[in-house]
Amino acid sequence: MESGTAAQSTETGTSNRSGAGAAAEAIEVKNPATGDLIASVPVDSPEAVAATVARVRANQPDWEAMGIEGRYHWLGKLRDWLLDNSERINDTMQAETGKVRGDTGIEGIYLTDLINFYGAKAAKFIGEESVRPHSPLMASKKLYVQYRPYPVVGVISPWNFPLALALGDAIPALQAGAAVVIKPSELTPLGLIEVIKAWQEEIGGPDVFDCVQGTGETGGALIDNVDFIQFTGSDRTGRKVMARAAETLTPVSLELGGKDPMIVLADADIDRAANAATWGGMYNSGQVCLSVERIYVEEPAYDEFVAKLTAEVGKLSQGPDGRNFGKDVGAMTSPNQLAVVEDQVNDALANGARALVGGKAVDGPGDYFEPTVLVDVDHSMKVMRDETFGPVVGVMKVRDSEEALRLANDSRYGLAGSVFGERERAESVARRIEAGAVNVNDVIVNYIAMDVPMGGWKESGIGFRHGEYGIKKYCRPESVVVTRFGGKREPTWFPYSKTRRGLVTRIAQAFNARDLKRRLGLRR
């Protein structure tokens, strides 16, 4: 680490807290690339969490009243701060995650684009909608729907992308008019603390945006106090979040694990496929929910693909690089995840798989696992069933696309997938993958195509990011019915009479008995 606010051991925390009790303990944040202690962060008690939520809740009505343009004004200031402080942010992320420099910059680019996307699209996505009455019985009524935000949205974010997956959920919620409180991973809280402090002190933003620090107890307290919870993490923890939220009937959106398949057809551009698999499997040390983890290759292309893939993976350099862009693959951010990766690879090797590249943890300071390509794998092995979340890919030879599809869909996960081949054929195969998103002749790119939804099927989650739903999920539709004209009383009101009821019945029968499409001129 060359420079940056988190480069040296320090005690830090968010500012502008009111009513927060004294922390009973502190989180030690270490650099996974070196093992060095870089910060000590106070843990928020459940009472402090409740006080933080109550404080931003009190300020949320004024934030909502600003309207879409007023809120975008402040989020635009956050965008500009992120752009102006990109190197400082990247320094901090490297220190707390162990990423190489080449893996850090994408988070800031993504977030600034996201702010502009929802700033431009929010009026279309959550603006007031006029609705035409379908029945002459409602002819005197004006109908419209307005979208009101959940007052306080809680975000529980993971350690692999500390800013993109925390602010990436906070930004649409804030643009929708909600107040937001984030609990980041205890492994990587420092970058978010910097952003919150900047919002409060440098930008001077409204007091509707804060974070709390801690482990499971802190997360539980956040769930108990907010009106909507967005969680990103493992399916195991996601189930616990959903169960806790059920106690207060708090709605949730869950982005959980993935075991994303890649299919390589015989007519694929093998060079492009091998390069995509290398980056898609090893980017961020494989610690991406959308990582390529299992690859199915049609038999005619198998040998060439494996040779090129192993050659490309074998060229990757690994280790800390500061600001120098001297390495390709960084450290494993979580020591526990390193143990998971090691267990999966050892299980595969013990059951007949071969490691053509890599295959073991790296000795020395820091938490590293070698970029690894496994062959002779099958679905009896953990590495082909369970999320690996590390720099490991398993490659299987298949007879044809039908076998590839059967294996690709043989998973409890369904987050994303990719198919490489002649475009029309590859697209036809991709349409049959059971996942929330598919890429044709590309990998992971669906995440930055924010015009379309991104989310999981099966056990990969509930709910979606991006697109219209990515902001609308933070809102509650409120239907408004306005009577524009009428007498002293409606025909259906008291006192009941046979004459008035008969009139209403005859109108309803005449209207409903006819062909609706013909009457509306939709069909001749």
Image (tube, rainbow, N blue to C red):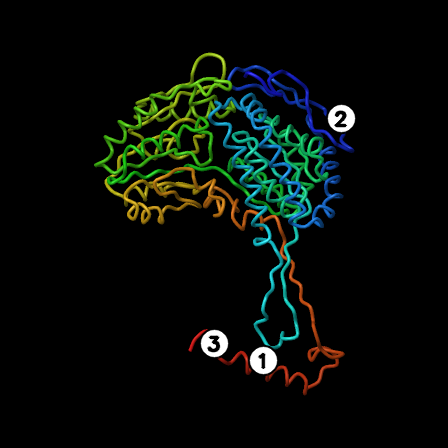
Q: Number of marks in the image?
A: 3
Q: Is residue 88 above or below residue 60?
A: above
Decide: few, some or many residues near mark 3? Use Cα within 10 Å; few <14, some 14-19, many ≥20: few
Which residue carries the number 3 mark? 521
Which residue carries the number 1 mark? 508
Give the secondary structure at mark 3. Answer: loop
Amino acid type at mark 3: Gly
Location of residue 329 by image quarter: top left
Residue 326 location, x and y as percent?
44, 18
Decide: few, some or many residues near mark 1? Use Cα within 10 Å; few <14, some 14-19, many ≥20: some
Q: Residue furthest bottom?
A: 499
Give the secondary structure at mark 2. Answer: loop
Front residue of 43/443: it is 443
Location of residue 247 by image quarter: top right
Amino acid type at mark 2: Ala
| Left or right: 147, with 356 as reference point | right
What's the distance in space between the residues labelled 2 and 3, CA to CA? 69 Å
Observer-side mark, 2 or 3, equals 3
**Mark 2 or mark 1, earlier in chain:** 2
Which residue carries the number 2 mark? 22
